[in-house]
């Protein structure tokens, strides 16, 4: 398939081109806090099959044991270098290895934790019919989830109320309308959003702000 061939070539080239940056980030994570360099969180992959998503660790060691599954920017578990990486999405770069292996795609619904997926309705489960991705419509609509949840007394409850409903609608939108040309558009939009966080593509304007 064209999508899988593109994913393989693009992720391989991306890993080669970004290898110096990946090395620097790995060193910074290791030097600034105790724990592993990479976070290997379990997420629901295509058709709900669990996968281990790779990220640079942005939180203290064993963070999941002392807090919930949702993280805001003011979460005390987030390290200083972790906050910086989250702001610019640098912690997501190791997911290129997931794309290379075929467990993820460059574009597709963002993988969710298993406990959240267990509560999906039959309609919402349709989002799992696609291979999960690094970016999608929902990632562009809400490019800084941690900032949106910052200050919330219960970040997880705020996520379920303010973010998850529209996020799932956008994931299902992608599932129903996906094409290679749409993938290229989403990648371009994602890059533009990284340099202009206030920009909203016309396809997402009716969804409002999270």
Image: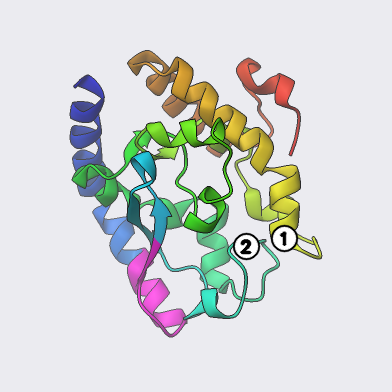
Of marks 1 and 2, which one's residue comes earlier in the chain? 2
Q: Farthest residue toward the front?
A: 122
> Going by the image, does 97 lie left or right of 210?
left
* The one of 78 and 48 positioned closer to us in this rendering: 48
> Going by the image, does 123 lie left or right of 199?
left
* The one of 75 and 88 positioned closer to us in this rendering: 75
* Residue 210, horizontal then vertical, whole percent: 74, 39
**Which residue is the site of mark 2?**
71
* Residue 139, horizontal then vertical, whole percent: 55, 38
Q: Is residue 193 in view?
A: no
* Residue 207, horizontal then vertical, whole percent: 71, 26
> Going by the image, does 80 lie left or right of 26?
right
Residue drawn at (69%, 33%) of the image? 198
Q: State the count of labels.
A: 2
Whole-number angstrom distance, CA of label 1 to CA of label 2:
7 Å
* Residue 28, magenta (yes or no): yes
């Amino acid at each position: 398939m064209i999508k899988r061939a593109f994913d393989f070539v693009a992720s391989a080239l991306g890993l080669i081109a970004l290898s110096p940056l990946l090395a620097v980030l790995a060193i910074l994570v290791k030097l600034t806090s105790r724990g592993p360099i990479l976070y290997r969180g379990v997420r629901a992959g295509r058709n709900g099959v669990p996968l281990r998503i790779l990220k640079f660790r942005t939180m203290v060691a064993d963070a999941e044991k002392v807090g919930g599954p949702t993280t805001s920017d003011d979460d005390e578990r987030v390290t200083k270098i972790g906050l910086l990486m989250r702001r610019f999405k640098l912690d997501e770069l190791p997911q290129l290895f997931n794309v290379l292996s075929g467990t993820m795609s460059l574009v597709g619904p963002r993988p969710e934790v298993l406990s959240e997926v267990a509560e999906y309705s039959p309609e919402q489960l349709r989002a799992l019919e696609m291979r999960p991705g690094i970016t999608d419509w929902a990632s562009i609509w809400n490019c800084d989830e941690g900032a949106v949840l910052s200050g919330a007394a219960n970040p997880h409850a705020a996520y379920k109320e303010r973010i998850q409903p529209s996020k799932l609608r956008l994931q299902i939108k992608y599932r129903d309308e996906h094409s290679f040309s749409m993938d290229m558009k989403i990648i371009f939009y994602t890059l533009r959003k990284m340099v202009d966080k206030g920009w909203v593509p016309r396809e997402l304007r009716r969804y409002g702000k999270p």
